[in-house]
Image: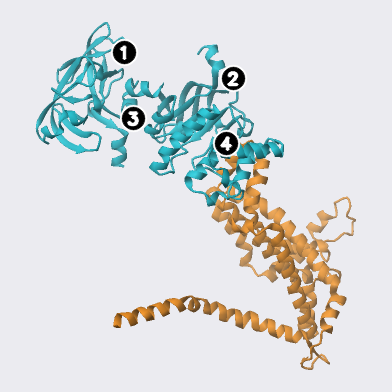
Amino acid sequence: MGDGKVAEATILLDAVTKRFGDYVAVEQADFAIARGEFFSMLGPSGCGKTTTLRMIAGFETPTSGRILLEGRDVSDTPPYKRDVNTVFQNYALFPHMSIFDNVAFGLRTAKVPADQVRTRVMDMLDVVRLPDMADRRPNQLSGGQQQRIALARALVNHPAALLLDEPLGALDLKLRQVMQLELKRIQRDVGITFIFVTHDQEEALTMSDRIAVMTQGRVDQIGTPTEIYHTPATPFVAGFIGTANLLPVTVVSQTGDDVTVETRLGGQCTVSSAGTTYAPGSEVTLMVRPERLVPAGAPLHGTGSGASIRAIVTSMVFQGPVVRCQVRTEAGADLVAHLGPEDDPGSFPVGSEMEMTWSHDGAYLVPEPIAADEAGVTSMEDDQTAA
Amino acid sequence: MAAATTDDTGLRRGRFAPYGLLSPGIIWLLLFFLVPVVMLVKASLSTKPSRFADPEFAWDFSNYTSALSEYSPEFLRSFLYAGTATVLAILVGYPLAYWIATCGGRWKNFLIGLVVVPFFTSYLIRTIAWTSILQDDGPVTALYRLLPWVGSDGRILATPLAVIGGLTYNFISFMILPIYVSLEKIDFRLTEAAADLGSTPWRAFRKVVLPLSMPGVFAGSLLVFIPAAGDYLNARYLGSPQTSMIGTVVQNKFLVQFDYPQAAALSLVLMVIITAMVLIYSRFLGTEGLAV
């Protein structure tokens, strides 16, 4: 990592590993978070995202590696000496204090003069749009309001970085969507680095400048929401962000930007290499997003002709803007296509045969293999419905 | 029509149900609190010409004036000893309760059980046991005499130190338990939040944990101070005539001298003063602390 990047970074994790006994919670986390960035750590529960956040906050000490805050090594600095503030999952507002005293807590700890405390607290209550709540107690506020106060209590200290630990988890869907936009607005207004931990991929996509997708203590990929959605680095990332149809394929040959791959049933198709060089014979994963998969003959979503695959329709579910069409290929993989009105879903009854096709740029090669039994559609939404 | 009648009785039953539930408590209070207090007031205003005569009700307020004029040293001593014992119980009991609540882990219930273990032995026996522990030729006193400001004839038994120590020892469980309960309820992620906002562990304790545990300290103080102020066993067995408390006097008046009017007046004065002190204390600590 170059020195210039280090200077730019608010936070730098240098090969950070955290073990609890034999359990590796975080393994070799190695990334930088730029000043003013909205950075999300996304992953299923137990992936190490919260542990990483707690190490940045100072509640946990790395087993090895260093954490740099504004260029200074803070790996062993206690939380009260770090210039970061946290919005806790359960808000952790002080129940015995008024809202004003809650928000003023950090400033008073830092011995800021009383008149300045008053103006800064009231200004911050304006920012979170709750100026009339100063005299209330936390238990007199709704969940969404407590959430805003927790945010105000942290932001009023002008920290180098604000850490948010699944702060929207306890809110209902509508309020969560409002707060997502609110958080983004506040982050733009105050210009502070936000580090946001969530298991909700939609939340991460909505708000983040960059996302680190984590699983089993490792960072699988760091990138912008677009990069992570369109060019996932691993099959896990592909399935975790949105819905993905994944097929195990073998590289046959590569000519310039075009990679020819072969499916398990012997069908071949050509996919863009996206700048990667593949050795013939290597096992990789072909990803097609449901919105890129269309019935043969229908207009392709994308450019260039791609490939097609024959399948039997197993279900057709109307979901409002799209019709979710599930098919089973001859190899036994379940694929999902999102059909729009132009695809005329009515003409494919369940049980009928259907040829699915995608454009040249509608597919993407994930440079890692998947097992044959993992082939087919994967998405967090399915997992959540099943759970 | 029949349905309407059933509804009506149901409604009536519902309306009287709360009183039904309350009545055992109310009857209990009437029989064992209000009636004795009325009898006590009546006795305190009576005269008793001789030791074995029956008291006669006479609106005699002299019992009160003499109670205050003759026994104010005992009153003062009672409140001083009970107050000191309460403070000592907080100083010893709070850290213990805090340690059990935060570091007890799966041993919590066992450790709290240990706090209650002394209750399995009679209060009287435990107090008398201390007389032999603290006796003048015992090892505790021998150690005590090594202190630079204590002479070779220094003693613990029959001193205020023994009485206050006995009071603290006998009532400290009543301090530990409510403090433990209030500490146990605190979400210790709040101390993380305080640390996150720049507070040292000590400041986080002062600003967050201590205020949130005040209801326990308040309840514990009442449970220690009130019985300690009226106690006579500790003063009697561990103290001397110079350390007698108001409880000692009342016990002596009632059971030895049979001077019921004077004893009743002393009891009532003690009750009124304690009530006043509790009210001032609760005002001082703030009722808001109790609401949390």
Q: Position of residue B53 (x, y in %)?
A: 79, 94
Q: Nearer the viewer, residue B121 or B248?
A: B248
Could you tell whether A243 is left or right of B118 in the image?
Answer: left
Q: Nearer the viewer, mark 2 or mark 1?
A: 1
Residue closest to the eye, A74 or B109: A74
Compute the Cα span from label 1 to label 3.
21 Å
On what subunit does the disc labeled 2 rest?
Answer: A
State the image coordinates of residue A263 (x, y, percent, origin top left): 18, 19
Parent chain of label 4: A
Give left or right: position of A48 versus A260: right
Residue at the disc numbered 2: A71
Could you tell me if residue A251 is visible in this image? yes
How far apart in space, not on screen, are marks 2 and 1 (Cα)?
A: 34 Å
Q: Determine whether, in the image, residue B160 is placed left or right of residue B87.
A: right
The C terminus of chain A lies in quadrant: top left
Q: Secondary structure at mark 1?
A: loop
Asked if one can make out residue B200 in the rendered structure from this viewpoint, the answer is no
- Residue linked to disc 1: A274
Residue A196 position in % (x across, y down): 47, 31
Question: In the image shown, does B174 or B199 lie closer to the viewer?
Answer: B199
